[in-house]
Image (cartoon, rainbow, N blue to C red):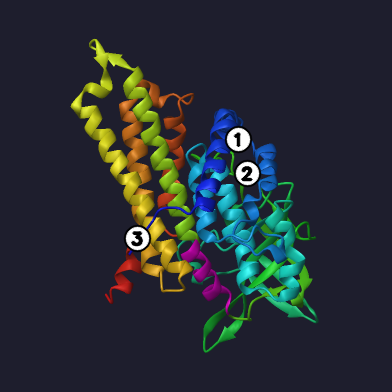
Amino acid sequence: MLDYRLSDELEALRKTVEQFAREVVAPRAAEYDERKEFPYDIVRQMAEMGLFGLPFPEEYGGMGGDYFALCLAIEELARADSSVAITLEAGVSLGAMPVYRFGTEEQRREWLPRLASGEALGAFGLTEPGGGSDAGATATRAVLDGDEWVINGTKSFITNSGTNITRLVTVTAVTGESDGRKEISSIMVPVPTEGFAVAKDYSKVGWHASDTHEITFTDVRVPSANLLGRRGRGYANFLSILDEGRIAIAALATGLAQACVDECVKYAKERHAFGRPIGSNQAIAFKIADMEMKAHMSRLAYYRAAEKMLRGEPFKKEAAIAKLYSSEAAVDNAREATQIHGGYGFMNEFPVARHWRDSKILEIGEGTSEVQRMLIARELGL
């Protein structure tokens, strides 16, 4: 029998992160958003709580939990601020998880304790200026010169790539050709390294307190031992990382969708028009009911995907469904929330305005909605 009730341990984690998000993150979210400033002090506190180590074994400095525990934390953080939530999601699922999944024992012991403690942030360089969804069009190249890789290329939209605690960027690069096809491998680049450069921060619509940059590699030299996983498996390995990451992004989207419900319920009770709370009007009440339904279904979708993943069963389709549904639910809820708030919904001092700006990227990052539909169709044999 399916039972999606959280264990006592997971419920304690959820409540702890919920309290932290409510008392520490939420009061400063608008401030960091307006200043477009990375929240180092909040990230430090998250590190002290062990959030960056949630899914990793204790032998590598982790908390001994699992990926679902990470998703619960991300959902609760996103109810307060998506920028903080994506910092954790990218730092763990894109920065540290590839090392854990595909690294040698030596690589794990060198990097995971620092990444799991939050002392250092990791990033993954996949997307390129001319690539986007076509990650197989990778143009960045790495050539073996003796016992070193020499890397040249550019990566775009890379989260956590330019903070003052960024210490590792794993990059996909063409390392040769086989049967006329590109051989794509993953290579770990310690930061700072000569030839590695971080461009000016993007001027983004949302996620203002998240660190996002274009990065370039100009004759960057790293030891040949920095190859992550088998040579030629970099693209395939990262696709599997994206499958997992979609569950985490679904959790983030669920948190944002739920935050919009929370704000609207509060506002609909406080805001009066024509002598009564606007929540007593069926038009408003039904909007909020539909928003709650979407947040609820989003949560069930990512719970189901995580359940299959942790059982060791195929979960690609379920992850794509969760990511697709929850991201579109987040955008829908954010739009309706601004509408319910009226003119105030267009003012940045109200959280729903930030949620509206932060929601759209969820339909794009870590696989667009179009890519999710393609994956679902393929899994159906179409």
Instruction: Give yes or no for contact between labels 1 and 2 (Cβ–Cβ under 8 Å).
Output: yes
* Disc number lying in front (2 or 3): 3
**Residue 191 within the segment the image draws in magenta:** no
| Distance between the alpha carbons at the discs numbered 2 and 3 | 32 Å
Any part of residue 154 in sight: no
Task: Name the amino acid, label 1.
Answer: Lys
**Magenta region, residue range:** 233-244
Closer to us: 2 or 341: 2
- Callout 1 crowding tier (Cα within 10 Å): few <14, some 14–19, many ≥20: some
Residue at image mark 3: 321
Q: Upstream in the sequence, badge 1 or badge 2?
A: 1
Q: Position of residue 231 (x, y in %)?
A: 63, 81
Secondary element type, mark 2: loop
Q: Residue 380 sits in which quadrant?
A: bottom left
Decide if residue 276 is on the left or right side of residue 299.
left
Q: Gap in Å between the C-alphas at discs 1 and 2? A: 10 Å
In which quadrant will I find the N terminus?
Answer: bottom left
**235 is within the stretch colored magenta:** yes
Identity of the amino acid at label 2? Asp
Label 2 vs 3, first from the N-terminus: 2
Which percent across, then down, holds residue 353?
43, 31
Q: Which mark is residue 36?
A: 1
**Disc assigned to residue 201:** 2
- At horizontal 69% and vertical 40% (from top left) the residue drawn is 40
